[in-house]
């Protein structure tokens, strides 16, 4: 598609909204708390925030620059700027569709929980143990979670196929503030539960003696996952930004919003975890056991639960759309498929992957990859290996290979470049991020 014909979003606010829509999702509310719970709470939070500031922000700007400079989807964008670097794009689109696969499963759980809240089934469970048992029953059911995952894939497909960007933009404007408001109310309720203080301490007072390389790797992987960076999603989104969009402000605002939602999720989850005597290292089930326990202690709990899970469904939807779009845009730009055909193909692949991921938590739980269920392996390998690898290459590319002037023009389309900011970014792209990533990698593999 030529640069002139390519659709663009409305303006800077839209750029922030759609990027934040991609970033804010189950990564913040489901994945972040479960990883923090498994990795020492506050120590994990600390490294997560450091990873966002030191590596995440510069990387997001790198991806934005590639996107606005080429106005192409990931593979084509890297190819345009440096032939052999299209590998960065390939890693990205492949990772996007694998993440989409297991993400749809969790998105399906939120949809099921919305329905269960509405019917009153969820609130009927007497305590945390009952919630845990109900969750286990649900995810291992032979077909119900599959049905919800497939429905979620179809909802994503519909939006992608209709190209209702305006609808997404507009609903993000209402949904995100509402989600934030809800999280604040829930955090207050949770922190005032009996025994909640213990949870706050767990989440906010780091115990650095327990930090290991795998904690840091998990925090870095989560930072990328949460910001939707490391695999070219933000390249694709930036390719739709209006000309002269202020990339720096956009990246800073998206990162702040995204981190805010994750921290709020921690403030909601951990006090309730300790108050109800739930094990913080319960893994992917953590949020689905804890949240219902909070709602059941609130007046009109069922109503709160319904609205909250519905907001979660919408937050997940704006994220599945971005992953779907990464792969669809690749098929359109590179395989020259019609947008409709490309979308069908992506949805098909995603459904197959999500069915496998979901079954691996039930009937196929005996099948192990590297000692993990297929679901856990998809989650672990994408976030802890593929995202950091994509991130490493993207930083090296923008730092060393991409034309310096072209990068500067993307970041400062109208004003004089700030040489301190550019100097810092270039340092992080060229040596800072690659060095940190390699060290963390080697350390977690036991080489240091
Ligand atoms: N960031 C989203 C979340 O936190 C998930 C996501 C959407 C994503 N697009 C992505 C993760 C691209 C990595 C790469 O829920």
Image (tube, rainbow, N blue to C red):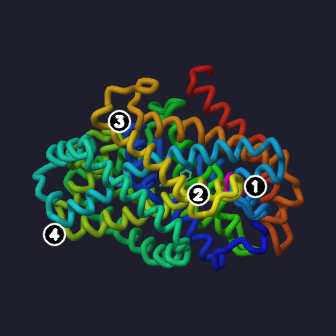
Relative to 384, residue 328 above or below: below
Q: Nearer the observer, disc 3 or disc 2? A: 2
Give the extent of the magenta segment. 57-62
Q: Which residue is mark 3?
A: 360
- Element type at mark 3: loop
Mark 2 residue's CB less than 8 Å from ligand 1 = no
Residue 9's quadrant in the figure? bottom right
Q: Residue at x 40, y 40 (%)?
A: 357
Q: Which residue is mark 2?
A: 342
Q: Which one is earlier in the sequence, the residue at label 3 or at label 2?
A: 2
Between 196 and 150, the residue placed more toward the observer is: 150
Q: CA distance from mark 2 to mark 1?
A: 18 Å
Q: Nearer the observer, disc 4 or disc 3? A: 3
Residue 72 point in image, percent of width and height: 73, 60
Quarter of the image with the C terminus is top right
Q: Which residue is mark 1?
A: 77
Between 182 and 409, the residue placed more toward the observer is: 409
Residue 309 point in image, percent of width and height: 31, 63
Q: Which one is earlier in the sequence, the residue at label 2 or at label 4?
A: 4
Q: Which one is earlier in the sequence, the residue at label 3 or at label 1?
A: 1
Say if mark 2 contacts mark 4, CB within 8 Å. no
């Amino acid at each position: 598609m030529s640069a002139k014909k390519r659709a663009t979003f409305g303006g800077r606010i839209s750029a922030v909204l759609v990027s934040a829509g991609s970033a804010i999702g189950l990564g913040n509310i489901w994945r972040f708390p479960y990883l923090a719970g498994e990795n020492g709470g506050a120590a994990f939070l600390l490294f997560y925030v450091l990873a966002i500031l030191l590596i995440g922000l510069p990387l997001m700007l790198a991806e934005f620059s590639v996107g606005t400079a080429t106005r192409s989807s990931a593979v084509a964008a890297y190819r345009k700027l440096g032939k052999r670097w299209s590998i960065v794009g390939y890693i990205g689109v492949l990772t996007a569709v694998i993440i989409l696969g297991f993400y749809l499963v969790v998105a399906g759980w939120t949809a099921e929980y919305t329905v269960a809240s509405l019917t009153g089934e969820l609130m009927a469970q007497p305590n945390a143990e009952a919630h845990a048992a109900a969750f286990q029953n649900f995810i291992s059911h032979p077909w119900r979670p599959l049905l919800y995952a497939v429905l979620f894939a179809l909802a994503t497909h519909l939006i992608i196929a209709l190209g209702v960007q305006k609808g997404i933009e507009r609903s993000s404007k209402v949904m995100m503030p509402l989600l934030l408001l809800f999280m604040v109310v829930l955090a207050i309720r949770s922190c005032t539960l009996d025994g909640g203080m213990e949870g706050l301490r767990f989440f906010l007072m780091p115990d650095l003696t327990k930090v290991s390389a795998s904690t840091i790797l998990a925090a870095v992987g989560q930072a990328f996952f949460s910001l939707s960076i490391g695999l070219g999603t933000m390249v694709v989104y930036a390719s739709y930004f209006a000309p002269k969009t202020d990339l720096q402000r956009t990246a800073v605002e998206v990162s702040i919003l995204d981190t805010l939602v994750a921290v709020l999720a921690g403030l909601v989850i951990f006090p309730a975890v300790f108050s109800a005597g739930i094990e913080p290292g319960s893994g992917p089930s953590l949020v689905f056991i804890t949240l219902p326990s909070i709602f059941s202690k609130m007046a009109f709990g069922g109503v709160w639960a319904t609205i909250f899970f519905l907001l979660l469904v919408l937050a997940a939807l704006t994220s599945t759309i971005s992953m779907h779009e990464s792969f669809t845009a690749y098929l359109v730009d590179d395989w020259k498929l019609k947008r409709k055909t490309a979308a069908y193909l992506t949805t098909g692949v995603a459904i197959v992957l999500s069915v496998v991921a979901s079954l691996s938590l039930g009937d196929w739980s005996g099948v192990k990859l590297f000692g993990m269920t297929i679901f856990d392996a998809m989650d672990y390998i994408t976030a802890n290996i593929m995202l950091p690898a994509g991130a490493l290459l993207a930083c090296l590319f923008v730092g060393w290979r991409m034309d310096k002037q072209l990068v500067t023009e993307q970041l400062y389309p109208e004003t004089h470049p700030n040489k301190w900011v550019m100097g810092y970014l270039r340092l992080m792209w060229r040596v800072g991020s690659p060095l940190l990533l390699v060290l963390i990698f080697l350390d977690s593999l036991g080489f240091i």
